[in-house]
Amino acid sequence: MKPDHFKIWENCLTVIEDNIPPISFKTWFKPIVPLKLNDDVLTIQVPSLFFYEHIEEQYIDILGKTLRRELGPKAKLEYSVVMDKSDSLDNGAAIMNVPTSNKTDLRNRPVQVPLSSDRPNIRNPFVIPGIKKLNVDPQLNPEYTFDNFVEGDCNRLARNASMAVAKNPGKTAFNPLFIYSNPGLGKTHLVQSIGIEIKKNMPEKTVLYVNANKFQTQFTESVRCNSQNDFLHFYQMIDVLIIDDVQEFAGKTKTQNTFFHIFNHLHQSGKQLILTSDKAPVELQGMEDRLLSRFKWGLSADLQIPDFETRVAILKKKIYNDGVNLPEDVINYIAGNVIHSIRELEGALISLLAQATLNRKEITFESAKLIVDKLIKKTQREISVDFIQKAVCEYFGLDVESLHSKTRKREIVQARQIAMFFSKNMTNSSLSTIGAKIGKKDHATVLHACKTINNLMETDKEFKNQIIEIESQIKI
Ligand code: ADP
Ligand code: MG
């Protein structure tokens, strides 16, 4: 009695499973369904044309061998490709008859798949028309170079990993490279730098930057036009695929599914994937597990809020690139107050320069302060006298206790005065409350402290910068 197709396929799977990596087995063989067995021909159902192609490319040897062992030397394999439901074909599947007995035979035989009768040529907005060879506009902004990306503690890991990937796309362990952060901290800039660097050194590589939203729109469009396969094939030809803001895929199952196939294809062919997101892979919501687990295969690195020095360095770089000059205290004021986003930092600088040009006036500290203060959303968080004391002491490396001691040491007296100054300006506490909390002083001492600090700020630039910096620390 002949065993049925399930049994045959099961036997094949047992052998195949022992011979390929578990992840490949799970991805490429688990979804296959044995359909029928007619004499020497086993028909298996695969989820997509791409699946069929991939299996033919990667696993035909082992498939052929195991099948011949089961069915004898005349064994043949037939694929049934499941079409997407949105496909207009009446018959749900396309059958391809492919002999497994002879590999050359297999390769030479054109596989006819009635995908759709009038399939348009690969249509993709990124392809530059009129050029025969696949020539993809990488969609890169020439400003977003590594040179223009200021290094700091906040971005060191992400930046170094990006540079490693740019040197050896697809050949490092950082595949995919997954960069995440809050908005405005440099994800797009950094991943574009990788693209620019690769294009510079390896112009033959096909690099593509695409925002997840655009990818999604293109995919939906391809479904509408019945050209999903073109869409899939186009993306599978890319050497370095950069997808920005993948959190936008959340809840979009079909797009995720397609991206999953693209991801697998590229990854298995040693191509580089670079992704960005507003969250770490573990925190992403609405994303399929199989996709999330792949996001974790390579390296995830985050970008953090830059510290004061890095913010100053970023501003200086922009100012230098723009060929303008700004007084040091203005730069420090912007860097000290626009804290949470580099995009806002740039925004403040741009509107400052715009106002100055419009008014044809020199930028002074006062005019800058006015503009910057208007721009930044002042944090409404309640700031307490205790919090201020802590921040001031942290800045100078002192114990809070020392502010409360009777000592007349200059540095402690000054720290105490600064804490009083900020408490008066940033809290609603009365002078006597402030005095009571900071070293049991009376209200006159607090008033005197405020006057002293104001005077010092007017005469000592260095001191004023310190005050600006402390202020920004308190506001974080
Ligand atoms: P995200 O994609 O994280 O929202 P962007 O890459 O769009 O952030 O960055 C916002 C702006 O800040 C861009 O104009 C970018 O050039 C600039 N920027 C971000 N990080 C840096 C950096 N380290 N050095 C210089 N400019 C930066
Ligand atoms: Mg971005």
Image (cartoon, rainbow, N blue to C red):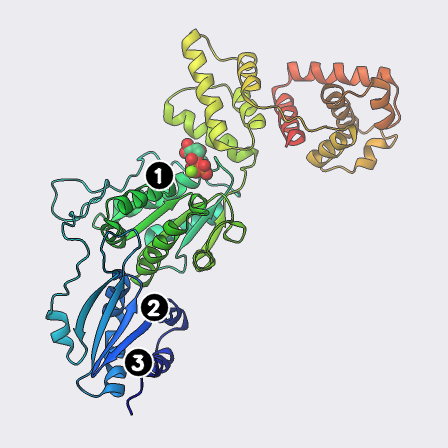
SS class of the residue under badge 3?
helix
Q: Which residue is mark 1?
A: 145
Dot 1: element: loop
Query: Contact (CB < 8 A) between labels 1 and 2?
Result: no
Instruction: Give the Cα distance between marks 3 and 1.
Output: 57 Å
User: Which image quarter is the C terminus in?
Assistant: top right
Residue 168: tell me if it is visible.
no
Q: Earlier in the sequence, mark 3 or mark 1?
A: 3
Q: Nearer the viewer, residue 437 or 79?
A: 79
Q: Earlier in the sequence, mark 1 or mark 2?
A: 2
Q: Residues within 10 Å of mark 2 (few under 14, many from 20)?
A: some
Callout 3, which amino acid?
His
User: From what the image shows, is residue 408 above or below residue 298?
Assistant: above
Gap between marks 3 and 2, in whole Å?
Answer: 19 Å
Q: As rendered, which of 372 and 443 lies closer to the eye?
A: 372
Residue 415 vs residue 316: left or right?
right
Query: Which marked residue is nearer to the observer: mark 1 or mark 2?
Result: 2
Please identify the residue farthest to the bottom as the structure is shown.
1
- Of circles 3 and 1, the one toward us is 3
Q: Which residue is mark 2?
A: 28
Residue at 34% from the left image edge and 33% from the top image edge: 143
**Front residue (pair 252, 375):** 252
Q: Which residue is mark 3?
A: 5
Residue at 11% x, 40% y: name it. Answer: 130
Whole-Å distance between the Cαs marked 1 and 2? 38 Å
Relative placement, left or right, of 429 versus 53 is right
Disc 1 crowd, CA 10 A, few/some/many (<14, 14-19, 20+): some
Counting residues from the start of the chain, the first of labels 3 and 2 encountered is 3
Please tell me whether residue 362 is drawn above or below residue 194 in the rendered image.
above
Which percent across, then down, holds residue 307? 56, 36
Q: Quadrant of ligand 2?
A: top left
